[in-house]
Image (tube, rainbow, N blue to C red):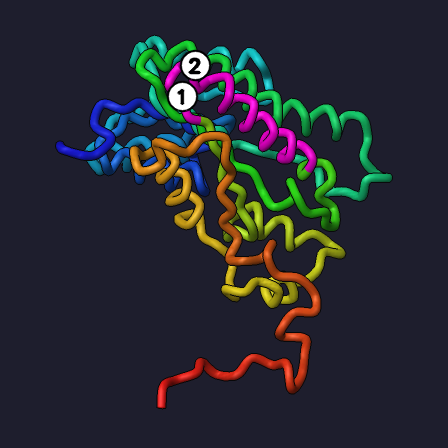
Amino acid sequence: MNGKYDGKIAVITGSSRGIGRHLALTLAAEGAAVVVNYRQNADLADDVVAEARRLGGRAISVKADVEDPQGIAELFTAVAAEYGRLDFFVNNAAAAAFKKIVDLKLHHLDRSYAMNLRPFVLGAQEAVKLMDNGGRIVAITSYGSTHGFASYAALGPYKAAVESFIRYMAVEFAGYGINVNGVNGGLIQSDSLDFFYGMPGMAPMERVLETIPLGRPGTVADMANAVEFLLSDKSAYMTGQTLVVDGGMTVAAAPYYHQVTEPFTLPKRPTRG
């Protein structure tokens, strides 16, 4: 098989479903060997491995809870044992409690750190040791890193910290030939999005979609495509950056066009003549 990622080895945390799954299959289809990390659902992970192999790539699944430092060590030990080296590390797994700040308990804050920030740093430390010929590190973040909104305080600030670490790692790891970047997602259609907007008291998703210039949620493919770009040679001169994939959500602001009336409503697309 001749693919642009022939010979490349990729670790993607939380890759049994969602963005991670789509990315794993995208890389496998181009010849990469992918390490499918999961915490609980072995059946889903095995399905990704089987599909990756059907597409022509190599794949293994590794059960490892990245919330636990020992789990991270076990993940990269498995990579070293199977492949001996690494090219791509994608920090994708995330979890947090969705509550008001005044309702956050100590264990909520501790888990947010342990799940959303520490695995990125510890994982990057381990990844660098295996990137003997340079490599790429990419972290998934979200618009909660720069914008405050209801119930997201246990996650957004940690995503902001991830973006800060991206910049610091980019400077420090450049000498190793390693580029470090991020992808900041908006409303991405997934199980997590359905859970978030299904919580009692949350605003209807339709109301939020009205504020997005492109008028729709993103897809896991939209996110995976951005990550794949950062893993590719096309982004070779990019490091320390975070791409925003949000349909224009974070560049729009109130008053929104759907809220105004004449003479400010947008006309139909102008034509010539």
Mark 2 residue crowding within 10 angstroms, few (<14) / some (14–19) / many (20+)? many
**Most common SS among magenta residues:** helix
**Residue 113 visible (yes or no):** yes
Does 164 appear in magenta?
yes
Label 2, secondary structure: give it. helix
Closer to the camera in the image, 10 or 43 = 10
User: Which segment is the magenta one?
Assistant: 157-179
Kindly indicate the quadrant of the structure image that contains residue 258: bottom right
Question: Image point 69% across, 52% down: which residue?
Answer: 199
Label 1, secondary structure: give it. strand
Is residue 48 placed above or below 249 in the rendered structure?
Answer: above
Amino acid type for the residue under numbered disc 1: Ile
Question: Image point 65% across, 22% down: which residue?
Answer: 114
Residue 158 in picture, x, y percent from top left = 66, 32
Q: Which residue is mark 2?
A: 128
Question: Image point 36% across, 22% down: which residue?
Answer: 135
Q: Which numbered tag is attached to residue 178?
A: 1
